[in-house]
């Protein structure tokens, strides 16, 4: 987390909570909702909210960071995330995507060890704790340490998709000021150890533009302790974390990764599958009531039905053929069995009554 920049004030905290559904809102709307939810004191004003949010965005951009909140041309604020314009319709019977899952015991142990090491004055202990955190994230981490050696490295156990993360740890809480060569150090052993990406890990980072530039120059990703903890809390693994090891601050992409788990493709396919179940069953019942030949429920029909459903509810979203095909494949899977293929060519489905 970026000191002096990314630590939210009560106003930023409240705005993040109000905007958590992904919808843009004016400062007036944020004020009303925040007061209704008891997130801010009654004497707060619309001007204070607007000023705090605007200055937050300006400071983040000025330091080369990705702000958590953005302001649009209408002076509305929204989370800096991909738009989620899909309805909350889910007939799949699966656990909710936003359900809080208990943290695994080994992950919690790694979190506790990491936080304790970050608070202590023991660089070697911090290195070992960071390697332990990578182990709990699904990597095979090796602590090296010592002069002229990397602090460690972590191998993603992904077969042909395997990659190696070089790990450099800095226990100082002001890396950008106390360690001007930190990014270069993190990349120093990449070639010798056959690394693919480089991670610089510290308790937190100062958000200076020069430090952000050094990360880009040397191809290093900066991970705070809070970033590793968030990844552990959400059960992230080497496959989805691969893109977060690009140059820059991991925090900027990690929050979007967590957002997409709830509001991304998994939700879209659930909504598509739910609409398909609902509308295909409606057509099948209508066929029985009226007689005659029912239209085949193909991918083209499904796309039209889903888009009509979304449009009728004021959503600007549109489904893709890939999402419809994924929904068909899931519904007809022997593990699900909510629909069957009409023919061997798998061009249309019939859903089971529910």
Image (cartoon, rainbow, N blue to C red):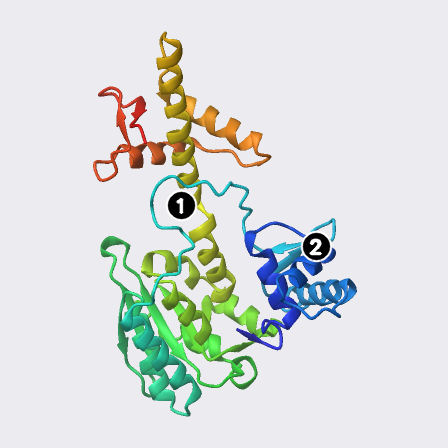
The CA distance from mark 2 to mark 1 is 29 Å
Look at 35% across and 50% down and name the residue there: 95
The answer to which quarter of the image holds residue 11 is: bottom right
Q: Residue 320 versus residue 42: which sits nearer the camera?
A: 42
Element on which disc 1 rests: helix
Report the disc number at residue 235: none
Q: Position of residue 303 (x, y in %)?
A: 45, 27
Q: Is residue 6 left or right of residue 182?
A: right
Q: Position of residue 5 (x, y in %)?
A: 62, 73
Looking at the image, the residue that sits furthest to the top is 292
Element on which disc 2 rests: helix
- Mark 2 Cα shell of 10 Å, populated few (<14), some (14-19), many (≥20): some
Q: Residue 269 versus residue 174: which sits nearer the camera?
A: 269
Report which residue position mark 2 lands on. Answer: 29
Q: Is residue 22 above or below residue 346?
A: below
Which quarter of the figure is the C terminus placed in? Answer: top left
Report the disc number at residue 266: 1
Q: Is residue 129 left or right of residue 275?
A: left
Q: Earlier in the sequence, mark 2 or mark 1?
A: 2
Q: Is residue 68 visible?
A: no
The answer to which quarter of the image holds residue 54 is: bottom right
Q: Is residue 124 above or below residue 18?
A: below
The answer to which quarter of the image holds residue 103 is: bottom left
Query: Depth-wise, is mark 2 or mark 1 nearer the camera?
Result: 2
Q: Position of residue 213 (x, y in %)?
A: 56, 69
Look at 31% across and 66% down and name the residue there: 137
């Amino acid at each position: 987390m970026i000191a002096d920049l990314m630590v939210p004030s009560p106003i930023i905290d409240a705005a993040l909570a109000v905007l958590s559904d992904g919808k843009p809102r004016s400062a007036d709307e944020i004020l009303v909702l925040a007061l209704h939810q008891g997130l801010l004191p009654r004497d707060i004003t619309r001007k204070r909210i607007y000023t705090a949010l605007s200055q937050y965005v300006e400071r983040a951009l000025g330091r080369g960071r990705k702000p958590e909140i953005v302001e649009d041309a209408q002076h509305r604020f929204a989370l800096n995330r991909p738009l989620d314009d899909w309805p909350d319709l889910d007939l799949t019977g699966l656990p909710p995507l936003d359900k809080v899952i208990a943290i695994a015991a080994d992950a919690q142990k790694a979190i506790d060890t990491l936080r304790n090491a970050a608070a202590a004055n023991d660089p070697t202990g911090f290195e070992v704790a960071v390697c332990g955190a990578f182990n709990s994230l699904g990597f095979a981490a090796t602590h090296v340490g010592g002069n002229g050696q990397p602090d460690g490295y972590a191998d993603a156990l992904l077969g042909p998709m395997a990659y190696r993360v070089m790990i450099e740890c800095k226990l100082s809480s002001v890396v950008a000021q106390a360690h001007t060569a930190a990014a270069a150090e993190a990349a120093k052993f990449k070639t010798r150890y056959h690394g693919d990406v480089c991670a610089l890990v510290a308790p937190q980072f100062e958000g200076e533009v020069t430090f952000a530039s050094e990360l880009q120059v040397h191809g290093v990703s900066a991970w705070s302790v809070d970033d590793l903890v968030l990844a552990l809390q959400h059960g992230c693994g080497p496959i989805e974390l691969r893109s977060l090891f690009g140059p820059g601050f991991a925090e900027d992409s990690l929050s979007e990764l967590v957002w997409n788990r709830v509001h991304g493709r998994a939700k879209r396919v659930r909504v598509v599958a739910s609409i398909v179940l609902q509308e295909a069953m409606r057509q099948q019942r209508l066929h029985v009531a009226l007689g005659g030949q029912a239209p085949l429920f193909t991918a083209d029909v499904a796309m039209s039905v889903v888009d009509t459903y979304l449009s009728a509810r004021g959503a600007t979203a549109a489904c893709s053929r890939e999402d419809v095909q994924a929904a068909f494949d899931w519904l007809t899977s022997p593990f699900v069995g909510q629909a069957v293929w009409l023919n061997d060519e798998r061009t249309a489905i019939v859903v089971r009554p529910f």
